[in-house]
Amino acid sequence: MRRILHRVLNVFRGERSDAEVTREIAAHLALLEDEYRRRGLSPDEARLAARRAMGSVAQAKDLHRDARTFAWIDDARRDVAHGVRSLRRTPGFTVVAVLTLALGIGATTAVFSVISAVLLRPLPYPNADRLVQLFAPDTERGLPRGARAIPPGDFEVLRAPSRSVSHVAGYIQTSATLTGQGDAVRLAGVQITASVFPMLGVAPLLGRPFDASEESPGADVVVLSYRAWQRYFNGDSAIVGRVAAFDGRGRTIVGVMPEGFAFPDAHLQYWVPYVRQDPKGGSFLSLATVARLRDGVAPPVAEDEINVTMRAADARIRGRFEAVGMQDELVASVKPALLILAGAVGLVLLIACVNVANLLLARTAAREHEIAVRRAVGASPGRLFRQLLTESALLSTIGAVAGTALAIGAIGLLRTLATSLPRRDLGPGVSLPRLDEIGIDVTVLVFTVAVALLTGIVCGLLPAVRHARAREADRLRERVASPRVRGALVVAEIAMAMVLLVGGGLLIRSFIKLSTQELGYDSTRVVTFQATPRQSRGPAARAFADQLVTRIEALPGVSAAGYANNLPLVQQSFGRDVSSQPYDHRPPRAPFPGLHAVSPRLIQALGVRIVEGRTFSNGEAARREALVTQAFARSGFFDGPAIGRQIYSGETSWEVVGVLEDIKQFRLDQRGGSEFYIVDFVPAPPGLGGTYFAVRTDADPAAIATSVRSVVRQLDEAATVDNIATMDQIVSNAMSRPRLYAVLLGIFAAVAMVLAAIGIYGVLSYLVAHRAREIGIRMALGAQRFRVVALVLRQTAVLTVVGVVVGVIGAAALSRYLEGLLFGLTPLDVTTFVAVVVMFAAVAMLAAYVPARRATRVNPLVALRAE
Amino acid sequence: MSDKVELLQGTLDLIVLRALSTMGPQHAYGLAARLEQVAEHPLMLNQGTLYPALVRLEQKGWIKGAWQRTESNREAKYYGITKAGSRALEKQAERWRRLAGLVDKLLLNES
């Protein structure tokens, strides 16, 4: 023990001990010399004899040092110092290698930080892995899970005590106008069952959670979000018990949730108790439902129990209720893409490694003489191996530091790219869930260190093994080249870069197709917003909307204004059971066409294109008219042309007067469906929704927003304006995910291509230098310049062709994983493949041209003399 | 140099301890001279080889080094055996004797 302690300490006392042993050996030699002189030798002879008797002083010191400390720690110190010196001698190499590694490690770190925050880190609740989201059966229409909330009757059955589930909680999105705290504001909130807070295991920061008895119409209580408390109540610490007006109704504030509490969404500002709905009532709102599993119960077991319970309660239930992990559900839409990005960034890192390995090989090739000399004077192969590996470890460490800095920047870029409009009503707009949680934390740093270590080993291993193993006799005699190994590395690099280029190319082309397709309306120069009057229901609300569009149309720069119950890419649908025959008693044909209740001028405001017929007429006549999309007109609903036909719904009917171009209503990557437009006003339902306004204007959107606010205020002092966005923003928002993927994979592909080009350049520069003599002879014998260039380019062509062929095969095999992310093209899109091959060939030739030019400048005399 | 005696691992430590215990504090050169004298062979070892053994023993706390002047007025590091060193010497010597006896017996029986 004591020895080990000594040795460890001695690693750090190295220099003092070295001086001590030098002194001791000097004294020893002096005594030996004295002795030999006494025996009658001359002083010089005595010194020589003393040295002989002593043996190698250096060896004695080494032995001393080996015994004194752990040799390898000390060696490592020396190796690092030596590595730093030798890297500083070749700044060009060092900069390129460090930058390459920084790019590889930085990109990997950035992508891992996303994966760590989004996929790996549990949700911020105690034992979050026990939380599952419950979904109603998919009855007939192929609805996505997100649209399958649980009807209130079923919910009441579900929440009864059960063996597999400890809590069941439901919620419904809502909104309300908060008045009396400065200007009236529209807040997004949520109705929750009292079980939500205990189920999540989160207590309020101030006050108390809801009580089960408060799930009744009479309980006027509210819990505020931290943000709402700070923003509208100035963080008043005595807030509990105060009364605030929500939609004109006084609610007692009973609690404030802690900062960062975001259930089910980050921008919700308040929670109110869920009010039990009468199951026999005509209209109802379904509840999004979350449950906490009891310990040891797996989701499938709970799912089975739920289905048994539900069947027992209602034999008519078809299909299965589903239980999906809450986090799985949250990230389900982005997980495949994130895994693809992880694979892509892994390739980038691998290319960076290969590139640095290649550079190290070239460098050690240039240092073969030095290495051979060191072997000849007694450095062991293991020792050389470690030293070469230390150099690459040093490179990857510096690369990791630079890469971490790069990753911080990259995460900033990523957040900017991934930011979407903070609204729940906009299609699948949120590009990345948990975006705020992405950052560099301890997990990410540990990962980066591990990647750096691994990178150092991978980069350094090949050069180190080659050079530590080769026989020194070969080296002293003649520099041995390793063009074949280096060629293989370049081929690997080209192949991997090709895979990334094809992937990036496919995503970019897909994004271009997505963003240039016909929307069915003119999204430019349209400002949209929502306005909610004090009286959000009844005839007063309709009068408010009508007056508002009339006043807005009178504003300078406005050419048209209108309102509707929904807008394209706003995630709300109002299906309506309609028929082409009066009093049709056949069962309705699902899916129903989408209903758009609009003001007549909305068609002009949105710039919806009319392909046949006309738009709504002016005045009361418009109320008997309908416009239909082409998809609806051709759906077979009308036997024959649609114009002039009637659409019936119960006692009401409308005459089709015009056919509209198809509109991307919900998603940009789906075909426009059956939609029809009638002149009507739908009051805001208690949840989301409300009326959307659209204004076509040449004026600055911000200026229009200001004018709109003042017009609204003139009409109704307590009305609110929110969700202001241009239609272009809404469209762009709907594309934020494909854009994010295309940009990221595009960046990776570009980096890969540059690295591959550097690899080609490096290996050819080396070849040219190596064959300078041959080239010199050829030129001395009268070879034309272009022949010399052709000679070098031929080398490139061979490497490139092999690399491209392997890469294309690899890309063809791998691109099918992109299928789910592609719009309008197949994973084997010929255009993309051809474009990538042509582009890559051009880049490769460009990278080869510089060394080729250099070859033609070889001076035959110098080249011949050089060897 | 086939007559050069290869020292068995561990024996050098024992020899050094023994020399210090009988002769009192010695410097490395003195020890080397003593070893040559005992071995009756000047080429038995490079004197530099002593150093690792001295370091080992010092780290174990069995000997202690101090700078002093020699009779010829040169400075040298004198090593002396410690109490722990004396105890270790006794134990090691006993072990060595037993081992040597065993090896002797085996070698005699085989020849």
Image (cartoon, rainbow, N blue to C red):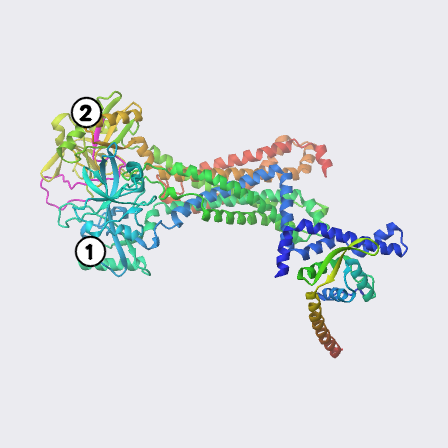
Q: Left or right of A70: which side holds A680? A: left
Magenta stretch? A561-590
The answer for which chain carries disc 1 is A
Residue corresponding to mark 2: A550
Relative to B9, residue A802 above or below:
above
Q: Left or right of B92: which side holds A27? A: right
Predominant secondary structure in magenta?
A: loop
| Cα gap from disc 1 to disc 2, whole angstroms | 49 Å
Q: Residues within 10 Å of mark 2 (few under 14, many from 20)?
A: some
Give coordinates of residue A394: x percent, y percent: 58, 45
The mark total stands at 2
Residue A157 numbered mark, or none: 1
The answer for which chain carries disc 2 is A
- Check residue A208 for magenta coloring: no
Give coordinates of residue A473: x percent, y percent: 72, 50
- Check residue A587 for magenta coloring: yes
Question: The N terminus of chain A lies in which quarter of the figure?
Answer: bottom right
Q: Residue furthest bottom?
A: B109
Mark 1 residue element: helix
